[in-house]
Image (cartoon, helix red, strand yellow):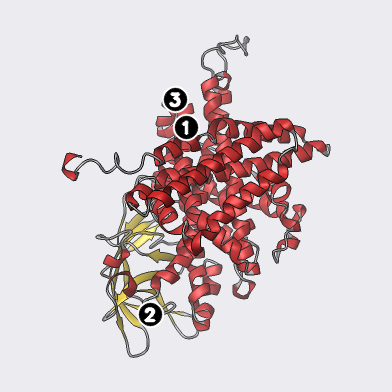
Amino acid sequence: MPTYTAPTKDMQFVLHDVLNISAASTPGYEDLEPDFTSAILEEAGKLTSEVIAPLNTVGDTEGCRLENGVVYTPTGFKDAFEKVKEGGWTGLDMPEQYGGQNMPQVIGSAVGEMFSAANQAFTMYQGLTHGAASAILAHGTDQQKDTFLPKMVSCDWTGTMNLTEPHCGTDLGLMRTKAAPQADGSYKITGQKIFISSGEHDLAENIIHLVLAKIEGGPEGIKGVSLFIVPKFNVNEDGSLGERNGATVGSIEEKMGIHGNSTCVMNYDGATGYLLGDEHKGMRAMFTMMNEARLGVGMQGLAQADVAYQNAVIYANDRLQGRAVTGAEAPDKPADPLIVHPDIRRSLMEQKSFVEGARAFILWGATMIDAAHRSGDKDADGLVSLLTPVIKGFLTDVGYDMTVKAQQVYGGHGYIEEWGMSQFTRDARIAMIYEGANGVQALDLVGRKLAQDGGKHVMAFFELVKTFCKDNAGTDEVFDKEFIEPLKAASKDLQSAGMYFMQNGMKNPNHALAGSNDFMHMFGHVCLGLMWAKMGLAARAALANGTGDAAFYETKLTTGRFYMARQLPATALHLTRIQTGADTVMALDAANF
């Protein structure tokens, strides 16, 4: 069975050596001293490694079962969920007013990575609840907040998001679910939703569904969509549970992965619902939840890559296979361990450099969310909005690739369920699809985010990279060559791609959109390059100051050199593809495919 060890030391390095969070001006960060964050991360690490991770294989093999309208989660899930609740982990970064601990997002993100890596399917029950609660917090009335949030923050009640219907996914303007106004101000919700994660289960006494629907007589298309709170059990005025609402599970989806999460077909048959936010402004309210979910899904890509990598390293050190080409390294054994072979090393270095760079990227993004929410920093809000499709799309695309590489280290054993590696690949696959498929993320980045606020935020990103390179050039001749110069070259590639879109996209939008996926990946590489340059600086500083753990920082520098030399140059390939335009992409008639 695979194992998981929470990467608390690396998280502490990013939080304090790289991001220096305790010195930041964001309210709440002054409390985030190393000893304090270490205590939180160590406790989360124990819970995830000892309680939640061992249930990952159980959830995969047992799955959920539907009996007489009730969904039963896998063995052990309910007890583990109670332990998570008892520890207050479900409300770590939620307001104290509703029972949360009001920790910054950056701590919630670090802990969230551990939970997702340990057991993605299990963690989705609380993750979806967090997103639904955030939407109610942002758009609900005081009465709605007081009614639903305390129970959702504690996860006594869980939450879902209901968008997709059998005939429409991304194009939500086609939805058919209707909302009929009632005399008491409520609505009757009728329709069917599919792919609803955590839609029905036995972990909580109530489930609060957020459902997109069209109010009868409203505008056509996406402009007529509203968002509604639809409880599984209606809630009485005193907060107690009333009658069962007209929201029932039709079936559980049979899926490639995340078997431990109950992905449901949900039927709404005149269910009582309550408008959340304004009429016909449902997408604005839902995007509060979706943007948070997209950042969380990006983290899932990182998390599955990390746990797969951890196990691949163990296997590569234990499995004896062949001899090192330069001579036996374990002459007392019948063969050398796999890790002596250059191609295995290449694969593991690709995994390691991605995981550690992505972790820094996620946590940097979380600091921007905190700055936006806690300090009202509009520039930070604009920058993280620009980077959201990159975090979601790039990290899940590459994260999935890394789980495949980890599986490949095992050879044939990686394909056998006994070893557990295929689960990481199967579980990681969904992250490229849900919360907006990655092709949509790329289109959003190029078609909308680049031009947002007159291009202010992408220009700010370029300036950020330029300033970093300028401020740190000349630090050391070797560092300049190994870190600064590759980052400058990659950033220039990204700017050249943006210029191509400006010059050609207006004439023919296909020229921009055909290159959107390449641009998203190019942007992701530049972001990880920036993270590695920052981590390299921090590692050099620690070594210069006489750290007691030189091996950790030397390893960090070596890993960074690998990324800058072997991975970051991919921007040149992506630029070449982008500059070929759309002609070859669009050349075939549909009938000729």
The residue carrying mark 2 is: 279
User: 185 or 156, which is in the foreground?
Assistant: 185
Could you tell me residue 372's position as x and y percent? 60, 65
Q: Is residue 22 left or right of residue 469?
A: right
CA distance for labels 3 and 1: 10 Å
Could you tell me residue 321's position as x and y percent? 51, 16
Q: Is residue 374 left or right of residue 266?
A: right
The residue carrying mark 3 is: 411
Residue drawn where x is 71% and y is 61% of the image: 29
The residue carrying mark 1 is: 405
Q: Tell me whether the residue at label 3 lies in contact with that at label 1, contact meaning CB atoms closer than 8 angstroms.
A: no
Q: Amino acid type of disc 2?
A: Glu
- Whether residue 4 can be seen here: no
Q: Look at the picture and state if 503 lies above or below 200.
A: above
User: 566 or 46, which is in the foreground?
Assistant: 566
User: 383 or 189, which is in the foreground?
Assistant: 383
Could you tell me residue 302's position as x and y percent? 53, 45
Determine which quarter of the picture holds residue 408.
Answer: top left
Q: Amino acid type of disc 3?
A: Gly
Could you tell me residue 45's position as x and y percent? 63, 48
Determine which quarter of the picture holds residue 330.
Answer: top right
Q: Nearer the viewer, mark 2 or mark 1?
A: 2
Q: Amino acid type of disc 1?
A: Lys
Furthest residue in direction right, as rendered: 546
Residue drawn where x is 39% and y is 72% of the image: 282
Q: Secondary structure at mark 2?
A: loop
